[in-house]
Amino acid sequence: MLSIDRNLKQHCPALQIVCIQGSVSVGKSADALVQLLNACAAQLSSQITSPEIVSNSDIAATRDAYRSLGKDPSRYRGSAEALLRRVTLGKALYFINNLVDINNLVSLESFLPVGSYDLARIVGEIVFRIGTSGESYKGIGKDLINIADLPVFADDEGPFGSPTSDSERSMITSSTRQFVMMIISFAGKVDLNVPAERAIELVTNHANGSDLSFQMIS
């Protein structure tokens, strides 16, 4: 279902992705999940300051990957870095729905970019590749995002997601029944089994997940 384009792999040789799939029931997050997220955010805000985030090896690897592709990582931040910065600045988390909130919790716990997508809105095979000149898409709650030279997930209809910001086309909604979650590491030597198993645990317990499985791609 997912492959990594050779050109992207040449720029980011340590790149690994774990791809999680299954069935889900999407709705408002229960109090238990909200409490988990808030507790994680509180712990991180007490342990790390905003300037210290970039010294984390996984965050640094994402920033280095963006530089290798010609993108300024201070302007186009990985989603994990952006979320961590929000937490360490004491800003409240957004609560969207249970699956998106699980996505964000896994990202906060792992310091890795995580993206979740509605499989019904994806056409054909998925390729993780470099965005080409002129490519863009409507971001979730945003205007058009310039994705040229960003690492992007694309299907037969074009790009729909990236480790920075995802598109409206493939976003998780209350009608989502089948999903795919991508956990991305540019660092190598990362045991992606840990966040993958954590994601499956959370989806099972907080989103009625079933038929869940994961696959490593490198």
Image (cartoon, rainbow, N blue to C red):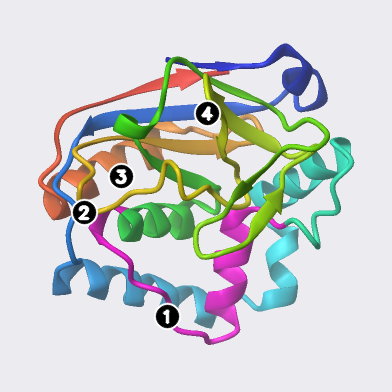
Q: Which residue is mark 3?
A: 198
Q: Position of residue 162 (x, y in %)?
A: 60, 42
Query: Residue shown at 40%/74% (left/top)?
Result: 94
Q: Earlier in the sequence, mark 4 or mark 2?
A: 4
- Name which of mark 1 and mark 4 comes first in the sequence: 4
Q: Nearer the viewer, mark 1 or mark 4?
A: 4
Q: Quadrant of residue 178?
A: top left
Q: Are marks 1 and 4 in contact (CB under 8 Å)?
A: no
Q: Which residues are magenta?
A: 77-99
CB within 8 Å, label 4 to label 3: no
Q: Amino acid at mark 2?
A: Ser
Tell me the element at label 1: helix
User: What amino acid does circle 4 point to?
Assistant: Ile
Residue at 80 percent of width and 61 percent of height: 75
Question: Of callouts 4 and 3, which one flags the residue occurring earlier in the amino acid sequence?
Answer: 4
Q: Nearer the viewer, mark 4 or mark 3?
A: 4
Q: Which of pointers 3 and 1 lies earlier in the amino acid sequence? A: 1
Asked whether 90 or 152 is in front, the reply is 152
Tell me how far mark 1 sits from mark 4, CA to CA.
28 Å
- Residue 114 % position (x, y): 48, 46
Closer to viewer: mark 2 or mark 3: 2
How far, Cα to Cα, is label 4 from label 2? Answer: 26 Å
- Mark nearest the camera among 4 and 2 is 2
Q: Disc 1 or 2, which lies upstream in sequence? A: 1
Left or right position of 57 against 18 = right
Residue at numbered disc 2: 174
- The residue where tag 4 is placed is 17
Q: CA distance from mark 2 to mark 3?
A: 22 Å
The amino acid sitting under disc 3 is Arg
According to the picture, the residue beneath numbered tag 1 turns out to be 42
